[in-house]
Image: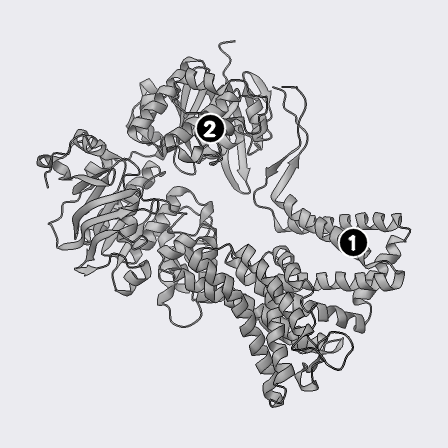
Amino acid sequence: MPKGIALPHVVARGEVRPVLTWAYRAAAVAFALVMGGLFLAALGYAPLAVYGTMLRGALGSPGMQKETLKLTIPLALTSLGVLLAFKMRFWNIGAEGQFAAGAIAASYFAYFQSHLPPGLLLPAMALAGFLFGGLWGLVPAWFKTRFGTNETLFTLMLNYIVFYLITFLREGPWRDGSGGFAAMPRFPRQARLPEVPFPFVGNLHIGWIVMLVMVAAMFVYLRYTKQGYEITVVGENERTARYAGMPVKRIILRTMFLSAGICGLAGMLQVAGPDRQLTDAVAGGRGFTAVSVVWLARLSPVGCMVVSFLFAALQKGCSMMQTEYRIPASMSDILQGIILFCVLGAEFFLQYRLVIKREVRA
Amino acid sequence: MPDIPAIQLNRLTKCFDKVTACDSIDLTVRRGEILALLGENGSGKTTLTNMLSGIYQPNSGQILLDGKPVRIRSPRDAIRLGIGMIHQHFKLVEVLTARENILLGQAGMLKVKPEDAARGMGLLVDLDRKVYDMSVSEKQAVEILKVLCRGADKLILDEPTAVLTPQEIQNLFDTLRVMRREGKAIIIITHKLEEVMEISDRVSVLRKGVNVGTVSTAETDRFSLTELMVGRPVDLNVRRVEMPPGQALLKVDKLCFTDAAGRRVLEDISFTLKEGEILGVAGVAGSGQKALCEIITGLEKPSSGDVLMDGQPIAGLSPREIIRKGVSMAFIPEDRLGMGLVGGMNIPDNLLLKTYRDQKGFFLRRGPAREQAQRMVERLRIVTPGLNVKIRKLSGGNVQKILLGREIDLSPRVLITAYPVRGLDIGASMTIYDMLNEQKQKGVGILYVGEDLDVLLGLCDRIMVLCAGRMTAIVESQFATKALLGMKMTGLVTDKEDDYA
């Protein structure tokens, strides 16, 4: 064996103190900004000015803040849904489809049942969104408990079915006859979410209250209820759950229904709130972003909300950067990618440390 | 040169936050010597070996290998320095062959050919068989070969006998003796004093992170070692409490079980467990003990036959349905953290597992469980930094006390226990036996699946022997001998006339 050659290798860490965790994450963000800055500079932009624009775009005025919050709400709710399934170690990556399924069900009421009394229409839409989203999530859960299918693949594949279902509706049955090109009509006034003032920002659709209530409810549900306890046990150790006499299959079905239902409700809030119409871009990748959000939040409901806000600010800032500097959209995707990559990379270094040097002389 | 020890530790210290796991430990191992490292759970044995295998870095002190001071910064460093660690839980890739496991990550760097190492040590391993096809002892042999092929001349074995049958233990010891003859330095960690006496040349005893003494094996005995280890004299006799025979509680009738792979795991098992009785189950590991326990407790469905509790049939019902029937049965499974407890939860949450359902309403009240946990920690002397610690971080004995404590608090009428003292030190084991006897005196019927025949003979009223899924004997333990049980375990005598029951 050649002497003196030490391959760098990784060694697992033990427990990491919370202070260190946050220090690593801050360092990761700083590193990402530097890398992104170099990239911007290479393209001939002034990094600091661009970053300033991003910050202004995300939070610079009440109007900007409002837009950022509008992006936060669906992402936070979707990640709460994903969180519930992940807590049970059920890898639901079908939030995208469940979100869209909820949006479709809500849209049905907006398009075809808008004659319902105003006090009934929106609750019906919300309920429909929750139920249809939930049922969409129940399908992979049922197959998993019945036949042991892999939920990761199953939930992922179901996404595509919903996407094409929306396309089908847009091309055919639900197409807006008045317009020239294929699109679905806008919602009637009574099917749009009411607006409520948000502190310092102005009127914002009622979804923000739903979000806050759901974060609190999720926190309490997971921590202080029997069902939340069951989810933890099934997630940690299914054999022990069975040993303790827990109805494991029922718990899986119930939890997945709730998880997907929350995603469906988020979909309803999106179509009835900012979108005011059903489009094929309704979920817009949130279902996948939510997976990252949940990991970064370390399965904490409040954390999900905070991380969702940061993601939304990043997204909003990037779109401002696009318009102001005419930087192509792909560039802002790259920048977002760099930041995400670094932050998620920091998670790796929180669990392992890299050993490069070797000081042993045998 | 011959006087330089292979491993020498000088005042080695390791602290975790406030806890000092190893406190200025001095230790030497010579070439051609087997040193037994003895100590109760939490005495610092694992920490010490982890420092030698590069998993932890000492806070202070020095490690000298063959007289040279070294720093071992990673397991890789340890291998390079000739230290081979054989963990209790094997680290093998199941879908690869033995040879592939040995070669893994070593491309062209092996010091010894696997064939040569196997032949030299008398290890009978088919190198081209997949690991998942191997028995526990063969896997262990592969682990040993792995470190030998990487050139290890200093071996550390962490409780290597815990998973082996008596015959396999002898084979392992033969291998260790060959390695000793070849001049390797060997540290063996074990709880079993008989094994220490049999295999080691010297014994170092750790207590609470301190090396309380190193003695030559020839000049000591089990009792003085125990006293050194525990810090006070311990009565090593397992007592049987005599009780008048009670009523029949649990009746198992012509039970058969064929597993998913079509293997006959249990065949025609019938017995009755009475109130206030400890019925032992002896047998080589894998003779059907696990299936028997899991069928009785509803985790498995039998292929045929009946299980009756107070005359009520319970075979084939799920644990939930059995609980619903009002049957109070407790089960201490063999793999505590794999089933029975949740490693990632704290003590109160683990106590809630079987009782949370009895709470009314939607919300979970943890108050009573916290009080119960506090009482249990005090009464059973569970060593824990607090109630909120994830139990995965506690030592095996403390984890077992939590499990047993929880099950006993349910005041069961039948208690099924599988290897309840596995991996536990002497002090903790004696506590467990006392707890079982206490339950027996309350009239609880106990099924005790064990491996140590001395304990089975001492503790149980009757012993049933399983061999390859068949019941080869059920005898009163006062009339039984180790030799008889041993023969029945290997199925040598199947003559019904030998039964005493």
Give the residue drawn at x 62%, y 89%.
A115
Amino acid type assigned to the residue bearing label 2 in the image: Ala
**Where residue A328 sits: x, y (%)?**
84, 58
Q: Is residue B302 above or below residue A111?
A: above
Residue B373 located left or right of residue A337: left
Chain of the residue on which disc 2 is drawn: B
**Where residue A57 sits: x, y (%)?**
82, 65
Count of numbered badges drawn on the protein: 2
On residue B168, which mark appears? none
Give the residue drawn at x 60%, y 80%.
A125
Seen as rendered, the residue at the extreme front is: A172
**Where residue B162 sits: x, y (%)?**
36, 34
Q: Secondary structure at mark 1?
A: helix
Q: Secondary structure at mark 2?
A: helix
Residue B38 located left or right of residue A193: left
Question: Distance from label 2 to label 1 (Cα)?
Answer: 47 Å
Give the residue drawn at x 59%, y 31%.
B74
Answer few, some or many: residues within 10 Å of disc 2's Cα (few below 14, many 20 plus, some between 14 and 19).
Answer: many
Q: Quadrant of residue B138?
A: top left
* Residue A274 seen in this snapshot: yes
Residue to which mark 1 is pinned? A335
Which of A219 and B471 lies nearest the eye of the viewer?
Answer: B471
Residue B165 located left or right of residue A359: left
**Where residue B168 sits: x, y (%)?**
33, 27
Residue B188 located left or right of residue A184: left
Whether pointer 2 and pointer 1 mark residues with C-beta atoms closer than 8 Å, the reply is no
* Residue A302 seen in this snapshot: no
Q: Quadrant of the C terminus of chain B?
A: top left
Chain of the residue on which disc 1 is drawn: A
Which of B145 and B460 lies nearest the eye of the viewer?
Answer: B145
Residue to which mark 2 is pinned? B98
Q: Is residue B11 above or below residue B33?
A: below
